[in-house]
Amino acid sequence: MTVRRFVLAAALALALPAGAAETPTVSSVLKRWVEATGGEKAWKGVKGATYRADSALQQIKGTQDVAVARDTFRRVTTEQGDTQEEAVAAGGAWLRDWNGHVRDVQGRDRADQRAEALIEALLFAGSVVDAAKLAPTLLPRDDAHPATVLRFAPKEVASFDVTIDDATGLPSKFTRNYFGDDVLVVPSDWRAVDKVKVPFAIATGGGEADDQDTTALSLYAPAKKALPVPARPEDGPRDVFFANSHAALSIPFNFENDHLMVDVRVNGHEPMWFMLDTGAEQSFINKTRMAEFGLTPFGASQAEGGGNTAPTQNTKVPVVSLPGVELRNQRHRVIDMSGLEKIYGRKMGGMFGYDFFSRFVVRVDYDRKVIDLLDPAGFKYSGNGKAMPFVIEEGGHPHVTATITVPTPPAISADLVIDSGAADTLNLCTPFVLDHKLLERARKKPPGEPNVLAGSEKEFFAQTSVRGKIGGLTLGAFTVKDIPNNLMVAKTGAYASRAFDGTVGETILRRFTTTYDYARNVIVLEPNADFDKPFKGRRTFGATFLSDGDDYRVFKVTGIRKDSPAEKAGLKKDDIVASIDGKPASELRLAEIRQLFLQDGEKRHVEIKRGDATQALDFVVSTVSLDDE
């Protein structure tokens, strides 16, 4: 026992900063921080501060104008002629995005924005003097926290840690967690201004240097009088223009790949398919179509898809046109969608995410295969549907609280994203699957090899899953029963995170006429004729087909399942389909090809190109279930 006490005492002595006489306390750490930044007397008359800074956000040069007090915050960022405004006050938290749309920041996003504001107040507005009132705690030194670290967790503010430099007493790093990812604020270049000391350089972002944005102050001014309290920012200029009145009605959509695809013109060019994707926090332009649209990219960042991350840029889009309506002067992100084009067998111009859905009331009628785009102002729903509230989090995703039942109790509460960009029923994230033992509870037998779409393993949208089945999903007023679904087992990408528990996709959403009303934070679900129909299980012939060529009429076999009907029929990986039942493949679409190989009992005569040779295959189609049966 004596030996253990001696070793512990020695370890504590080694952990103390040079010259320290005793173990640090919250009070002593805060006192040293105040003294290192000028002292309580110097901060006493400071009511807040303003500063201007040069910024490099996503490798785009701009400026920031900030006004921060101990309980309010306002930042206006200007770049490429556009502005973005963030504001926090007692009355709320707001964001005016690059397109001029203002939204009330909600849920965990609001707590995170308040944490950002508090960090700014600690650095620039003298809140460190009163920081003890926020009841921070001192974390014990261990392998995870080898330095002096204070943890702040005020009410309605996302918790964050402050690492204190033992040599100077100044904060060297602020760390908060945003939906599973650590976000760092690293201050440096400390300078004295009017007797107080503040950082003139800040790096913000992930742990890697190439994943950080930089800000360099050019002017800092402590305020001796109270600063104006920020209000909700003003909306930008009107950017939605209807051809007739306040609605664009009966816009047809293509659903052959279980996705909402609409024909869209960008800058008056040839129409291309855009996906309507509520799971996208912003709208995207396909990188491979930028030249065709006459667009120029700028900046650099990353976006996280279902399985992997992908590089992105930004672009300004003067006009986006759908039948009966235009969006003007939009700033979209840019991402390579060539992999999606090969999966869907069509040119894709991009996808519409939060930027699009927030401008309209979007009604999707799956029976008629049309969407209506309505002006939110004055809209009032009339029908037999029921409203389901949602919260916008992660920058633009509609989160709902749902209930899942599996064959063995208890029922499980789940934070799900309504994702019209997901084709299947329900995708449940890896941590949620493991936490609730769904590989055992939602399956009859142990899972085999995970399902991965052959030929797209490295794409940002790739998914790694096994099939399961849940007893029911309750969304608002409705319960959908006996649902085959995907249990994610991926270790990377969005589905590997704890940011949400899963997504509700099109195979469930198509059972309703859905009305997305982002202005009122509700989705109205109105059951259609498919609501009570049993779900069809997922079946396969055993061959994965992707399309290629300028018109996506070259159909290549990218994968063959072992011991599958496709393997027994003689198909091999890298075969090119030349014709089916005498019809040239060039006259077919990829969706038709896939359907022809799902029709059990049908005879098929298939000619394939294998290298330099052409070979004929004759067989009867049979399929096998991918579900846990």
Image: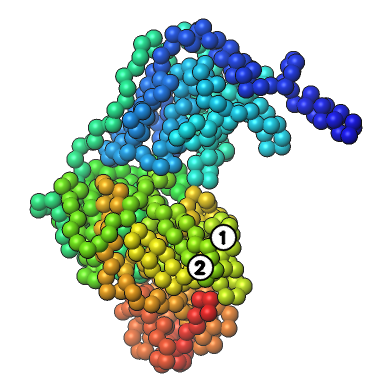
Q: Which mark is residue 436?
A: 1
At horizontal 39% and vertical 53% (from top left) the residue drawn is 400
Q: Which residue: 47% across, 52% down?
A: 500
**Closer-to-camera residue (183/93):** 93
Residue behind mark 2: 406
Structural distance between the alpha carbons of marks 2 and 1: 10 Å
Answer with the quarter of the image where residue 259 lies: bottom left
Q: Residues within 10 Å of mark 2 (few under 14, many from 20)?
A: many
Count of picture labels: 2
Q: Is residue 3 left or right of residue 523?
A: right
Asked which secondary structure carries label 1, the reply is: loop
Query: Is residue 119 shown left or right of residue 16?
Result: left
Q: Amino acid at mark 1?
A: His
From this viewpoint, is residue 344 visible? no
Q: Residue at x 36, y 11 (%)?
A: 225
Q: What residue do we see at 44% from left, 73% from top? A: 482
Q: Is residue 622 left or right of residue 511?
A: right
Viewer-closest of 234 and 110 = 110
Toward the viewer: 110 or 388? 388
Q: Amino acid at mark 2?
A: Val
- Identify the mark nearer the N-term, 2 or 1: 2
In the image, residue 354 above or below residue 370: above
